[in-house]
Amino acid sequence: MQRDQHMTGPSWAGTAGAVLAALSIGLSAWAAHGLDPGPARAGVQTASLYAFGHGVALAALARAAVRRLGVIALAVLLLGTVLFCGSVAGGALLGWPTRLAPAGGSLMMLGWLLWAADALRR
């Protein structure tokens, strides 16, 4: 059966969202059971929470992104999530600088605003 590209959104967004959600569950479990209470655990749990929420959102919204603005919104959400969560988790676990977290958070907000603009145009 051939897939009608006009009826479904990008599969990359759904796939990336599902992978983010799965990784966040493992990361959160590891933080809860493998890290001592403190800043590292809190940072990893924060990164896991945002990765899970945005992963589920990407997976759920992927099929609805049929217009260019919706696809761009999901790409911005994915990039923002990776930058924010990666920066926060890297800072907590490896002592990396977290300077990318604000850019990632800003991109997540921009992605949601772009999604809202696309929804208003439908």
Image: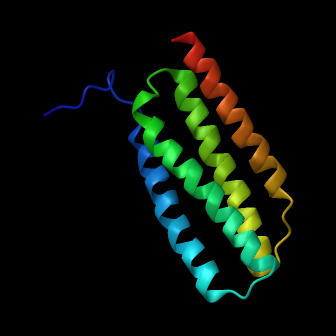
Horizontal placement of 3 versus 15: left or right? Answer: left
Against 86, residue 56 (above or below) is above
Q: Which colour scheme is used?
A: rainbow
Residue 46 is situated, as x and y percent measured from the top left of the image, at 71, 63
Residue at far top of view: 121
In this view, the residue in front, 19 or 50, is 50
Residue at far left of view: 1
Q: Residue shown at 65%/26% (left/top)? A: 114
Horizontal placement of 39 versus 19: left or right? Answer: right
Horizontal placement of 121 versus 87: left or right? Answer: left
Q: Image quadrant of residue 84?
A: bottom right
Q: Report the number of discs.
A: 0
Residue 100 is situated, as x and y percent measured from the top left of the image, at 81, 56
Q: Residue shown at 86%/59% (left/top)? A: 99
Q: Residue shown at 69%/60% (left/top)? A: 85
Residue 113 is situated, as x and y percent measured from the top left of the image, at 69, 28
Residue 108 is situated, as x and y percent measured from the top left of the image, at 70, 42
Q: Residue shown at 82%/73% (left/top)? A: 96
Instruction: Name the image quarter holding the N terminus.
Output: top left
Against 101, residue 23 (above or below) is below
Against 68, residue 41 (above or below) is below
Against 2, residue 66 (above or below) is above
Q: Image quadrant of residue 35?
A: bottom right
